[in-house]
């Protein structure tokens, strides 16, 4: 990979990184240097970024967020220059207008103003996710802020490690530097700053809080939270910071106060920009999307009435699961609504989406789905993970309690087992607000095809309820480690490699192409042997076993490398139906021996149709006519299979 995007945040550290990367690696990488302006950066920051660009020939790309108020889409970008860059918070206000006041529970400002704006620009020039590395200005002495991700690099940590004193010493020797004290960096009154720093700013330049106070007054109720919001920690607003700055004694509160990952710069691709680092312990203030904002509710009602989508209500809470049914599967009714109703959980009283699982995604090369064809797949490498062979588990909350549903039920055997296992093993787990954790439920009694040596809940993904964006695997790994749960395995494979494999005792792979601020493209790649076995397990019913016995077909395929528990099930029905055949035949023969041998056909008929003998009269008449009666007996045996399900029926 010979593309490198260098994220310039406007601080001394990222400036030093840009200088070194340009000097050391300009012949090795095709480089783009980018800076995202929020409109509330200090003028000194803008001048510093411009000077770095002019002095070192960075060809720095300046972008600002382009907010789409008319549709549910993450921010795009517009290219600006040092001269045309906003100075009065214009981009920031547009983000607040759509998403609400930014703060610790809702840190969408860095995401929308910086990360999404920059990635939008990169896509516009043909740099899709996965085709380039991103260099971030984080130093060796703050390595805890690093994220473990395939396409993220930290030059000042790994390539040429430097600490804060070393960076500052270097800048002291340069003809220019950032003319700001440490507490003044970033947006002038950034909510990530400690209260101590904010109070100091309020004491030195109280007018800087005017814009922030105006935003709180104008947009306190903006965004999807439905609750009044303020910028600063402890639910303080700008006025409270100003009042606090007037106190002669600020007390131990400020002495112990720390930044929220904010020092001299705010990294658009740093851990804090993803809102994954701060794991919330309660649902207070969490963003919730309305059902009508997610899908066409008129079409949903029509699908429910036509039994295309199944509905299940929680046994005591006002919650509903929407899940596509067999009619959707058999008739291939795949539209925006059916694809989204794959275990979707909604609060009946508020019509808020409580849990958003994966949308329906299809197998590689699925007929009628052009996006699954090899020639239409993105050129970038996907995130390839193992496809586990269990049941999907969807975490939802009722107050402080967490529970697990399956795609179609709050109370299925799998949901009950998973909820109990979660309570026992993961009751202390903490998940970020506004995201739905998804698990694979694996235990012995829920075995489908693959036999696993362990059981439990395996973390598959976290899905953003509002946007559908999935958390990258690197962040999942951090959450899984922090919460003590198993994580689905990521593999270093291409689509070309995965599609020709056929591993035993395994299902296959899931390929994911992440999409910032939107649902990813996901494709299933299943092994040939798994598909054969899965078809047998889900399509062979007791009635089919009865038909095979009636028609004298071989059972060899049903015993060829199939799971032993499936073979036991087949034998149970095969032996049971054969025993029933023998019982009916024996009963018929016993009655035949008791027939009035000197009676005419009419007399025989009266005998056959009397009392209990009538149930096998068809067989007795066959005996009388010296004809084969096997098919007649098998028709009687069919009653045993009525309303019996296949060995495994998918939800």
Image (tube, grey):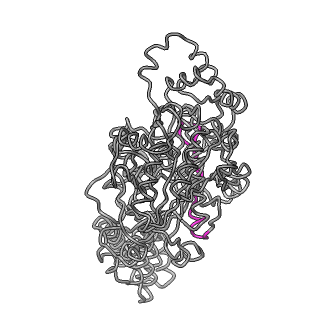
Please state the total of marks drawn on the protein image.
0
Please state if 292 lies on the left or on the right of 369 as rendered.
Answer: right
Which residue is depicted at the point 44% across and 24% down? 257
Task: Name the foreground residue: 219 vs 502.
Answer: 219
| Res 591 → quadrant | bottom left
In percent of width and height, residue 354 lies at 57, 43
Residue 440 visible in the shown view: no
Task: Tell me the residue at 43%/71% (across/down).
Answer: 525
Residues shaded magenta: 311-332
Q: Residue 315 in magenta?
A: yes
Question: Is 590 placed above or below 339 here?
Answer: below
Q: Is residue 272 visible?
A: yes
Taking the spot 53% from the left edge, 50% from the top edge, the residue there is 52
Question: Residue 617's x, y, as percent?
Answer: 46, 75
| Residue 231, percent from left and from top | 59, 30
As drawn, 95 above or below 105: below
Furthest-left residue in this view: 453
Which quarter of the figure is the N terminus placed in?
A: bottom left
- The residue lying toward the viewer, choosing from 500 and 216, is 216
Q: Is residue 284 above or below residue 172?
A: above
């Amino acid at each position: 990979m010979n593309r490198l995007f260098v994220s310039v945040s406007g601080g001394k550290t990222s400036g030093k990184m840009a200088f070194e990367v340009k000097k050391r690696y300009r012949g090795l990488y095709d480089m783009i240097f980018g800076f995202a302006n929020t409109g509330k950066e200090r003028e000194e920051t803008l001048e510093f970024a411009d000077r770095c660009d002019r002095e070192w020939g960075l060809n720095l790309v300046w972008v600002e967020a382009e907010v789409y108020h008319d549709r549910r889409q993450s921010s795009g970008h517009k290219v600006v220059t040092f001269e045309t860059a906003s100075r009065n918070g214009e981009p920031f206000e547009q983000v607040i207008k759509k998403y609400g006041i930014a703060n610790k529970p809702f840190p969408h400002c860095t995401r929308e103003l910086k990360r999404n704006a920059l990635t939008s620009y990169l896509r516009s020039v043909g740099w899709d996710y996965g085709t380039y590395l991103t260099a971030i200005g984080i130093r060796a002495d703050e390595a805890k802020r690093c994220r473990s991700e395939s396409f993220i690099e930290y030059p000042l940590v790994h390539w040429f490690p430097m600490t804060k004193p070393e960076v500052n010493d270097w800048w002291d020797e340069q003809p220019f530097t950032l003319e700001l004290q440490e507490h003044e960096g970033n947006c002038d009154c950034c909510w990530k700053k400690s209260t101590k720093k904010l109070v100091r700013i309020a004491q030195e330049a109280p007018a800087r809080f005017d814009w922030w106070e105006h935003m709180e007054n104008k947009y306190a109720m903006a965004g999807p939270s439905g609750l009044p919001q303020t910028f600063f920690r402890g639910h303080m607003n700008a006025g409270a910071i100003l009042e606090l700055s007037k106190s002669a004694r600020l007390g131990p509160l400020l002495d112990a106060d720390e930044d929220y990952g904010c020092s001299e710069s705010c990294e658009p691709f740093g851990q804090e920009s993803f809102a994954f680092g701060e794991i919330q312990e309660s649902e207070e203030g969490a963003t919730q999307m309305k059902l009508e904002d997610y899908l066409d509710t008129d079409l949903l009602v029509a699908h429910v009435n036509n039994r295309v989508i199944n509905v299940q209500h929680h046994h005591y809470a006002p919650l509903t699961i929407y899940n596509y049914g067999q009619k959707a599967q058999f008739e291939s009714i795949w539209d925006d609504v059916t694809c989204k109703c794959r275990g979707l959980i909604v609060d009946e009283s508020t019509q808020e989406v409580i849990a958003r699982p994966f949308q329906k995604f299809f197998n590689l090369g699925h007929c009628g789905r052009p996006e699954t064809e090899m020639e239409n797949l993105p050129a970038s490498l996907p995130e390839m993970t193992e496809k586990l062979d269990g049941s999907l588990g969807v975490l939802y909350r009722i107050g402080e309690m967490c529970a697990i549903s399956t795609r179609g039920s709050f109370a299925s055997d799998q949901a009950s087992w998973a909820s109990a296992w979660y309570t026992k093993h993961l009751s202390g787990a903490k998940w970020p607000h506004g995201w739905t954790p998804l698990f694979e439920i694996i235990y012995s009694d829920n075995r489908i095809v693959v036999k696993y040596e362990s059981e439990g809940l395996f973390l598959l993904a976290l899905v953003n309820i509002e946007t559908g964006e999935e958390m990258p695997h690197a962040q999942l790994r951090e959450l899984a480690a922090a919460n003590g749960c198993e994580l689905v395995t990521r593999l270093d494979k291409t689509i070309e490699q995965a599609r020709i494999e056929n591993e035993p005792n395994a299902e296959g792979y899931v390929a994911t192409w992440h999409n910032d601020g939107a649902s990813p493209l996901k494709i299933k790649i299943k092994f040939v042997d798994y598909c054969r076995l899965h078809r047998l397990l889900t399509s062979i019913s007791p009635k089919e076993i009865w038909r095979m016995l009636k028609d004298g077909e071989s059972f060899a395929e049903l015993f060829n490398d199939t799971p032993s528990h499936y073979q036991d099930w087949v034998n149970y029905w095969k032996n049971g139906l054969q025993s029933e055949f023998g019982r009916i035949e024996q009963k018929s023969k016993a009655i035949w021996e008791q027939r009035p041998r000197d009676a005419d056909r009419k007399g025989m008929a009266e005998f056959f149709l009397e009392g209990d003998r009538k149930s096998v009269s068809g067989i007795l008449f066959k005996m009388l006519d010296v004809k084969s009666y096997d098919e007649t007996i098998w028709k009687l045996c069919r009653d045993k299979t009525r309303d019996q399900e296949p060995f495994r029926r998918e939800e």
